[in-house]
Amino acid sequence: MITKQKGTYDIYGEEAKKRAYVDEILDSLCEKYNYGYIETPVFEASELFHRGVGEATDMVQKETYDFKDRGDRMLTLRPEGTAGVVRWFIENKLYGNMSEPVKVYYNAKMYRYERPQSGRNREFTQWGFECFGSDDVMSDAEVISLAYNAYRLLGLDNIVVRINSLGDDESRNRYRDALLDYLKPRINDLCEDCQKRLEKNPLRILDCKVDADSDIIKNAPKTIDYLNDTSKERFDKLKDLLDLMDINYEVDVNLVRGLDYYNHIVFEIVLNDSYALGGGGRYNGLVETLGGPNIPGVGFAMGYDRTLLAMEEEGVHIPINDSIDIYLLYVSSSEKDTAAYLAQDLRLNGFVCETDMMSKSLKAQFKSVDRYNAKYFIVLNDEDLKDNMVTIKDNKTKEEEKVNINDLVDYLDMHM
Ligand code: AMP
């Protein structure tokens, strides 16, 4: 038997319905915030992620699915959504007319070679969005507001937005120097990966999974103490805006996030003070790093798996329709064609309709009525059909009526 790959899963049945419910809420919310939907390819040139996400990140070093295609191109299955969207933004020269920000959202499969565990897979779905062109702190607030309210609308009330600031380039550089001075004499006590990260990207050491609990990391200098005046003012302004918007947030001075491209605000949405459901931040240098002009950007990504797990844990009720409107039964095979035609007619008129395609006995068809949890059922028999009539029965009240087949849609419209 060929089985699915480790860290991948099939989505069907109730799980598919739950995800469709989440999709609907997120689509509708993005529409209100005026974000347009975007789909980018599943695979891109490997270089996009190496440059975009950062050569020194764990994601690029250990987690990407890289392969050569038959034309000898080095390709990578996307591990995250931002780099592809930035590539699209640059390739289509959308920076040419930046009188308004460009705002897009995606809902897409991502691929990371990780150790699978609950809420962490190798193929997983992320919902995310990006806003290009505004460096105003208002756009930081808008992105946080969209992310925060998405979880609220999904029924997750026990969430907090953890925010931190890495500051502008000047602040980041000052911080980097201070961090290097602090880490150099202590580096031999950290893991091998951290030792490699020291020169390339010391900030990554701060979210090393291996050394997370070490005192060296805990006592490391904090970005917030190295912000210059403009970065500090900006961070304060953001907090004022979040207060005004009634968004539940707290400053987390240890938050740096795992990717290279952030500056100024970084944030995560955390459930019950335990685990992150999603994260984002500002990435003003990324468009330029990927070959475009100096255009600011800010974005966020939510993991579907963890969000659905969280909804389950929090006892959120997801309305799932597990009934159909009408089941069509037929007494003998001579009414089968009418069943086929009538089923189509009812479906095209907006009703969820089923009929028997397994040549069942009438008794077995009645069992299907209950199995499908049909609200109404119609028994087709030649006698009635001669007069263009059908018998329709309410499966709950068991009331039945004879209705002209041409009046059936009106009858159902009135009764449902
Ligand atoms: P990141 O791009 O790593 O910041 O991830 C953003 C969000 O995507 C996380 O908070 C998770 O909810 C989700 N996520 C990241 N990696 C995985 C994974 N391997 N499986 C499932 N969800 C993930």
Image (spheres, rainbow, N blue to C red):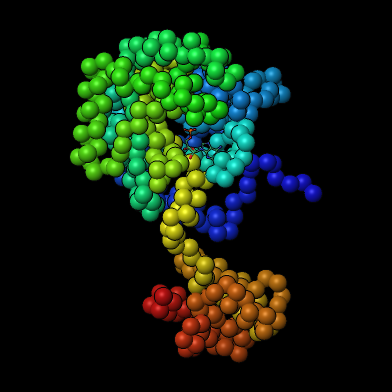
Q: Is residue 346 left or right of residue 159?
A: right
Rendered position, 143 above or below 258: below
Observer-nearest residue: 345 or 416?
416
Q: Is residue 279 left or right of residue 188?
A: left
Residue for point 74% across, 46% down? 3
Kindly identify the residue that appears in the image at 48 percent across and 10 percent down.
184
Please tell me in which quadrant of the rendered image residue 250 appears: top left
Residue 132: in sight, yes or no? no
- At x 24%, y 43%, the residue is 246
Q: Quadrant of the C terminus?
A: bottom left
Left or right, 95 with respect to 326, comes to: left
Taking 143 as reference, is 228 above or below it? above
Q: Position of residue 7 (x, y in %)?
A: 64, 41
Quarter of the image for residue 356 reads bottom right
Position of residue 289 measured from the top left corner of the image (x, y, whole percent): 44, 15
Relative height, residue 198 to residue 109 (above, below) = above
Give the camera-side residue of 39 and 5. 5
Instruction: Work out whether 324 lies above or below 180.
Output: below
Question: Which percent across, then down, holds residue 290?
Answer: 46, 17
**Residue shown at 59%/83% (left/top)?**
380
